[in-house]
Each structure stands twice: as C-alpha cells, then as structure tokens.
Image (tube, rainbow, N blue to C red):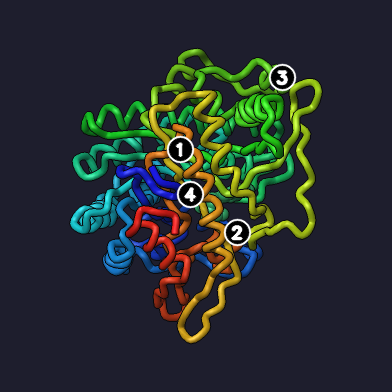
Amino acid sequence: MAYGEFPADFRFGAATSSLQVEGSPRADGAGETTWGVLAATPGGILDGSDFDAACDFYRRYPEDIALMKDMGIDMFRFSVNWARIFPEGRGQYNPRGMDFYKHLCGELLKNGITPFVTLHHWELPQALERDFGGWRSKETSKYFGDFAEKVGKELAGMVKNYFTVNEISNFTETCYNTEGGYSPPQVKCDRKTERQCVHNAILGHGLAVEALRRTSTADTEIGLAENPGVFIPAIETPENIEACKKTFRLANAAKLTAICEGAYPEEYLGQLGADAPDFTDEEMRIISSPLDFLGLNIYCGQYTLANANGSVKVLPFPEGFPVTQMSWGRVTPEALYWGLRTCAELWHAPKYYITENGCATADVVRDGKVYDTERVMFLRAYMQNMLRAVREGFGPAGYFAWSLLDNFEWREGLSRRFGLVRVDYETQKRTVKLSGEFYREIIRTRKLV
Ligand code: PNW
C-alpha cells in the first residue's frame, strides 16, 4: 500500500452526542437530566448558554444526514438520551422518545450511512440521581442494563453497532469527587464513594453488554468508547516504550484494564486500601463480558521518558507548543498511534475504532467561508499517526471525527466549536468549513491529501 493510503475496507465517520446537538431536551415526554438541572442553575454553564436549541438536530436531522452523505461520511455515531426513553430512568417507557431514534436510524439507513449508537453519553435521568444517588448506587447500573435491553429490542434490525458508555471518567470521577465535582451532579463525596461510582459505571457497562447480546441480532457488534490517558515515549527506545505500556495499564486500571482483564490490578487495589470499591467476583465476570471492539476517543497524550524503576517521567509541556482552545487541548498527534498500539499490545481486542478525534478552534467567518487551517493541520497530523498504526498492523477499522457540527460543549456551552461544519446558532445555518472539505477529499480519494 502506498504511503498515505487507507485500506480498502477502512471506514470514515462523524460523531455527535444527544444533548450536544439535539435541542428540544424535554420534547415528546422526555424527562429531566442531571445536565438539565445544571443548565438551569446560575453559573452552571460558563458562558450562560443552554442546550434548549443546540443544533436543533432533533428537527433538522434529515438535512444534516444529507450533508453527511454529500461529504461521503458512511458511519454516524450518535447517542440516545436515556431520559427520552425512560423519563424517570426506569419504569414507565416513553415510546415517543424512542420514535425519534427510530426515525433517525431509518433516515441514516435510507442514505447508506451506518448508525453507531452510544447508550450513555453523560446525561443521567435526574430521577435516578434524586432517588438513588446516581452512579453512587448499583441501582443505576442495573437500570442502565434495563435501558440497554429496551433500546436493543426496539432498534433490533436497524442498529448493528453499539457503544455502551462514553468516557467513564467524565460521568463519574468528574461528577462525584472529594472536591465537589466539575460536572453535574457536582457531588462532594469521600474517596471510596468516588471509586465506587467508577466501579458501578463499569458494572453498568457489563450489564448493558449482556442485555444487548440478549436482545440484538447475532451480527450486532458491541464495545464502549473510552478516552484512556495516553503516554507517548518521547524517544522510542525499548525502555521508554515498556514504561509507557506499564503506566498506561495502571492509569486506566479502574476502567479499560478492569474491563479487558476482568480484574483490578493488585497495585490499584493496594494503593486504595480501605478506599477500594466494593465488588464481587460475579460483578467482575459481568464487567469483562467479551467485546467486539474498543472505541478510543483520542485528543491528547503526554510525552514521557522512563525512570530507572520502570515508571515514567512526564515531561513538561513546552510553552509555545501548539494548543487548541480547550485547557487540555495539547496538540500531540503521536497520541493516536500510541493509544492504538498500547491497547493492541496489552489487550488484543478483536477490533478498534477511533471514536472521537478533533479540536476546538476560534473560527471566523470571512465572505461566508471558514478557513480553519489549524483544524486541517491537526487532523492531518493525527491521521498520519493513525496510518502509521495501519502500516504496522494495528490500525482501526474506522475513524470518527469529533464532531460533525459545532455543538454544545458541556460546561463551556456554545463557546467552543469542534465541528467540520459551522453552525450559526442564530439562524441554524450550516457552513462546511475548510476542514470539512479536507475530510471530504480524504474520503473521496481514500488518501491523506
Ligand atoms: C469528549 N480531556 O470529552 C466528549 O466525548 C465529547 O462529548 C466532547 O464534546 C469532546 O470530547 C470535546 O471535549 C473530553 O480532558 C473531555 O482530555 C475531556 C478530555 C477529552 C475529551
């Protein structure tokens, strides 16, 4: 294969999530979510915006699907808002909420685009928080399994690819911790409770895998989308590479390592002592239910060197090195290669997807165009590293750009733009950015152009 070429079966997609694009969060009988409560609290969303409209995808999805088709995108990753399906998180089913996702899947399939469904992308039904303490309780894990079962049943035949959860830390550790939590429900709790939330989330993942296996057709593929901390050997010596691998496994001990190995590493439990979560052997069996693929959201990594004892020394990120608009948005393209390689060497999953990759930039409209050359440079550099992984035999089956559209960036509100397509929030007008044209050309030629 020539340099820069993608394999014939490599697939190109775009990703979004429910709350970030849909708008109409309470339409058609949907329940309240933890994010809805935060958005209604003064100071909750930092720029004072909300997601009542977002990209109005709830009503404009046919137009956005046509746009994707025109760009050549053939996989679409979106999430289901749990509170649209079960307004109280459990109990009373709301078929009108489900209808939206059925129509969305129908429209995608009609246009030759494969739906990839995420079941939980952060917005928890508020009733589960109110009644059980959200992810602090195993009740939530159990109800998540029930929700997965219902979605699997209702979408059977239309959806053949599922991600159970998206980025475990961002709906557990970031929300329930000793400081009080950045994201909703912003709960201040002790260390053991924080660790328990993560355990309950991976248990929910496992229960959802089992539920989807029961209800979906045999050709359905199931995984999750995680954003593992990635360690990059600054110089590729065997010692530096080995230290990164060892550190990666421990840094992700409570999530990917537990899911892929079926046990928490001894070092992790040892470090926690009495703060370790409560769990059973049966739960670890459920948590490690075999997966068809791992989805990796890769934005940034840390450059490292090995210490003499085999751990890593994280190198300071140099001042003047390129960053994007998020505080964590360090431009570190090698993270894409090392994320894939480290997972492949540690766990040998049957398949990988890059489920998110992208950056926030300060886009400017000039004569109706957005020349986001920094996003083009960013994507090109990360994709070059993806192609290195392909050449070395551990390339992913496909890549999802984050995001199709500018959208509601959580606590940053509408102030951060990640789209290949610009959204004017006043008029809901879509404008394909230069990066969108770049992506279209890659898909058309199947080469990194
Ligand atoms: C992801 N980090 O979040 C989420 O899956 C998306 O919903 C979100 O819009 C997107 O990335 C951009 O932020 C992340 O600290 C949150 O490195 C934090 C990090 C990465 C991704």
**CB of mark 1 within 8 Å of CB of mark 3?**
no
Mark 4 / mark 1, whichever is N-terminal:
4
Mark 4 CB lies closer than 8 A to ligand 1: yes
Q: Position of residue 240 (x, y in %)?
A: 70, 29
Disc 4 crowd rating (10 Å Cα; few below 14, some 14-19, many 20+) is: many
Is residue 75 visible in the rendered structure shown here?
Answer: yes
Which residue does the image show at 34% across and 47% down from the upper left?
A: 11
Name the residue carrying label 2: 411
Name which residue type carries label 2.
Answer: Arg
Q: Nearer the viewer, residue 3 or 156?
A: 3
Q: Quadrant of the N terminus?
A: top left
Whichever of labels 3 and 2 marks the residue nearer the N terminus, that label is 3
The residue tagged 1 is: 391
What is the secondary structure assignment of the residue under circle 1? Answer: helix
**Gap in Å between the C-alphas at discs 3 and 4?**
36 Å
Measured from the top left, where is residue 228 in percent x and y?
58, 37
Query: Mark 3 is on which residue type?
Result: Ala
Q: Which mark is residue 356?
A: 4
Task: Locate residue 61 relative to residue 364 in the image: left or right.
Answer: left
In the rendered image, residue 27, in percent from the top left (x then y), is placed at: 35, 62
Tag 3: Cα neighbours inside 10 Å, few (<14), some, or many (≥20)? few
- Decide which of tag 1 and tag 3 comes sooner along the chain: 3
Q: Amino acid at mark 1?
A: Arg
Residue hosting label 3: 274
